[in-house]
Image (cartoon, helix red, strand yellow):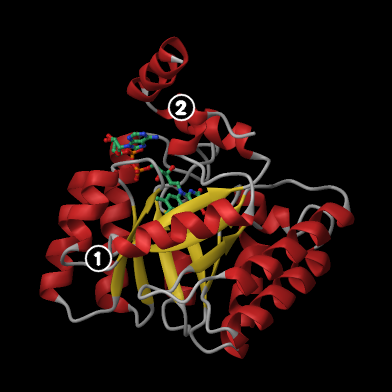
Amino acid sequence: MLPPIADRFVAGESIDGAVAHVRDLDDAGIASIVNLLGEHYDDPEDARADTEEYLRLLERFPDTAHPPSISVKPSQLGLNIGEDVFRDNLARIVEVAAAADTFVWIDMEGHETTDATVRAYEALAEQHDGGVGICLQANLRRTADDVTRLGDTAGKIRLVKGAYDEPESIAYRDGAAVEEAYRHLLHRLFTDTTVGIAVATHDEELIEYALDLGDQYDRDYEFQMLMGVREDRQRELAATETVYQYVPYGSAWASYFYRRIRERRENLRFALRAVVDA
Ligand code: FAD
């Protein structure tokens, strides 16, 4: 069972927990992006099992004012096993999602997966006009070229700082350089492209910058943040902006939870306090 301290960041182990969270967020004016936790599979059966679970999840999505979407990880759908395995599983999910009018995000993982992920996105975006989105990472030097390549594809681009520890030769490693790259790329998304834009950050300066760009340019854009991180700000923003919360669930919650805890010392204090108070 999910321990009470993990439920700040993870919406339970089952579809029931995810669906309940989708409903709660909807009441607060926030839409969900639901992610089944799981990654780096080497066995095609594991990738197939998660694909089937996503199909069951899509069937269970409630009819809400702010329709939920899903986000999948390439290595969860079998990219480590083969690009064809990943593409087949992803295509099954996108087909069912499209029939239900549900948007599908493709998360971005380490740099060795970027090319295959971009190829899969391009192919699907062409088939399913506007129903698929991809995440691009500001820390990767190549992302400027990826914005050029994908900027007029029918779909959406989610811009993040990047969660993977990448080498200096291909990535900005210094926090200030990543933030600068993020600003530059976000500006380009608003001014040089026609895609839907998702501003996925908890960084207040970048949120303010995005709000300024939103005032200046008449573009479709949304904010995205993680469950359990700056939730007050999410609710405040949702009064005037489109806000999505990334909602992970599933039995593989432990590594995700510890990653969130390690990111911030105050989260560690929160976790320890929960243990002490239990
Ligand atoms: P940071 O500089 O890390 O944080 C800015 C501020 O946010 C901090 O000062 C703090 O106030 C607050 N904050 C940040 N993290 C926490 C926390 N854990 N607890 C409490 N407060 C916190 N990365 C990928 O590589 N691929 C993906 O597909 C991907 N998808 C994502 C989807 C969404 C919706 C989001 C929000 C992030 C995603 N990321 C992804 C992660 C991203 O790359 C960053 O690692 C992560 O968002 C932290 O960067 P930040 O922009 O929030 O800035």
User: Tag 1: Cα neighbours inside 10 Å, few (<14), some, or many (≥20)?
Assistant: some
Dividing the image into four equal quarters, which quarter contains ligand 1? top left
User: Tag 2: Cα neighbours inside 10 Å, few (<14), some, or many (≥20)?
Assistant: some
Q: Quadrant of residue 26?
A: bottom left
Q: Quadrant of residue 106?
A: bottom right
Q: Are marks 2 and 1 in contact (CB under 8 Å)?
A: no
Q: CA distance from mark 2 to mark 1?
A: 31 Å
The spot of residue 185 in percent (x, y) is 32, 61
Disc 2 target residue: 261
The spot of residue 220 in percent (x, y) is 29, 78
Say whether mark 2 is within 8 Å of ligand 1: yes
Image quadrant holding the N terminus, namely top right
Residue at 59%, 78% in the rendered image: 122
Looking at the image, residue 234 sits to the left or right of residue 67; the answer is left
Is residue 48 in sight in this rendering? yes
- What type is the residue that disc 2 sits on? Ile
The answer to whether residue 206 is above or below residue 3 is below
Looking at the image, residue 171 sits to the left or right of residue 159; the answer is right
Return the mark for residue 267: none
The answer to whether residue 4 is above or below residue 269 is below
**Which of 246/16 is in front?**
16
The answer to whether residue 76 is above or below residue 145 is above
Residue at 47%, 61% in the rendered image: 33
Q: Quadrant of residue 28?
A: bottom left
Disc 1 target residue: 187
Q: Residue furthest top?
A: 276
Looking at the image, residue 203 sits to the left or right of residue 79; the answer is left
Going from N to C along the chain, the mark reached first, 2 or 1, is 1
- What type is the residue that disc 1 sits on? His
The spot of residue 94 in percent (x, y) is 64, 77
